[in-house]
Image (cartoon, grey):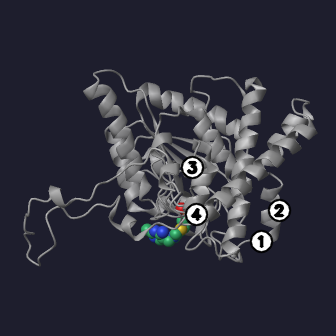
Amino acid sequence: MTSLSNPAPAAPDSQVHQKVYGDLDHLAPVPGTAEIPVALKKQWLRDMFLIREFEVRCMQAYQEKKIGGFCHVYIGQEAVAVGCTAAVQHRDPIVTAYRDHGHALARGMDPKYCMAEMFGRIGGCAKGKGGSMHMFDRANNMFGGHGIVGAQTPLGAGLAFACKYMDEVIDGGKNSRVALCFLGDGALNQGAFHEAQNLAGLLDLPVIYVCENNGYSMGTAISRGTTMSHSLVTKALGYGIDGYVIDGMDVLEVYVAMKRIADKCRETSRPAFVDIRTYRFKGHSMSDPRKYRTKDEEDVFEADDPIGKLERHLVGSGAMAAEEFKDMQKAIREQVREAVAWSDASPVPPLSELAHDVFIEPWGEYTGSSQPEITGGAPNLPSCRTIDTQEELL
Ligand SMILES: Cc1ncc(C[n+]2csc(CCOP(=O)(O)OP(=O)(O)O)c2C)c(N)n1
Ligand SMILES: [Mg+2]
């Protein structure tokens, strides 16, 4: 008889959320962090600081009641979105959950359109009808922003399927794209995630599941809600998917590791799973008093701030003058202030927008029978418009 036993005992809470570096050695080498050009590092510092500043202003606007509904800020996790998007190509699709402002900005969305969406204004990327959790940007291949925990994981598989199908079946070539599907550690407990992984493993889908492991789902520590929380890659191994662990508080490490993983995924058209260790410095949402964790714990992670780390690296090595960093901060603060002013000036969506960009039942209203009456459908469909420029709406 052969028996299989759980390979590793559960670790106590304190050990679960510490840095662990995965074994990436079997992947093809890419330049190490030391060889990354200074111009790129400066760009990532700028990108991370833009996200930070954007989120600080969102918190302020929320207090002023300019933003309604839910609002989950990304402060502390900036290196993940910036490093991961830098490691793939712009034409590679990405999809994420509701903590999505950082991904939208890292992908290149203009902060004006992102902020106006937060404000529920017509100038927003979803014309103010989606709000904080539904950042969507077709031009930048960002497919949401999804509020239901885990809902984006089958979509990640679907995006990878679409890329592969277009390249291999329609164009008769070789797959050339990878999909990045970000998820929180809480999504690991959702059935949809496991179904998506099964299909990705089975169909050789070029999707990378990037689990932003910030240690908590709302107020629940990962070890209290998820099995094998000390070794999340085991969640993927059962589906034949390779797993990696990355330090998500260091954008240079994220970039180098993700580049290797993405290159392999693109080449082999096989999925991957990444447990990327990070931390959200603020509460789950704007109404979270954070009573479930200690100040000491927060201090440890805040000392590991990804922005401060890259700034120290660049300024400390003489690659960037302290003055240049200050100027960069000043310019970004101004850019975000302008985004707020622009959003303030953008009108709320008119009532006529209500029936645009939504799917309606093409077979007519449900009549109560088990066979909905077919009425021909299509002519009744409202036009699903796409907008080329946000300005045309103002
Ligand atoms: C299916 C579903 N169940 C519950 C919720 C409520 N909910 C919103 S956020 C959240 C926690 C998710 O945590 P995690 O995936 O770790 O993401 P993080 O907030 O840490 O980024 C829960 C349970 C939801 N949105 N969807
Ligand atoms: Mg989490």
Image coordinates of residue 235 in percent, x first then y, are: 47, 51
Mark 3, residue position: 104
Tell whether label 1 touches label 4 (CB within 8 Å): no
Picture layout, residue 29 above or below residue 20: above
Q: Earlier in the sequence, mark 4 or mark 2?
A: 4
Mark 2, residue position: 299
For the point 65% across and 62% down, the residue is: 73
Q: Earlier in the sequence, mark 3 or mark 4?
A: 3
Picture layout, residue 159 above or below residue 26: below
Residue type at tag 2: Asp
Circle 2 or circle 3, nearest the eye: 3
Residue type at tag 1: Thr
Quadrant of residue 56 in the image?
A: bottom right
Q: Is residue 280 visible?
A: no
- Tell me the element at label 1: loop
Indicate left or right for 170 with 271 as reference. Answer: left
Q: Residues within 10 Å of mark 2 (few under 14, many from 20)?
A: few
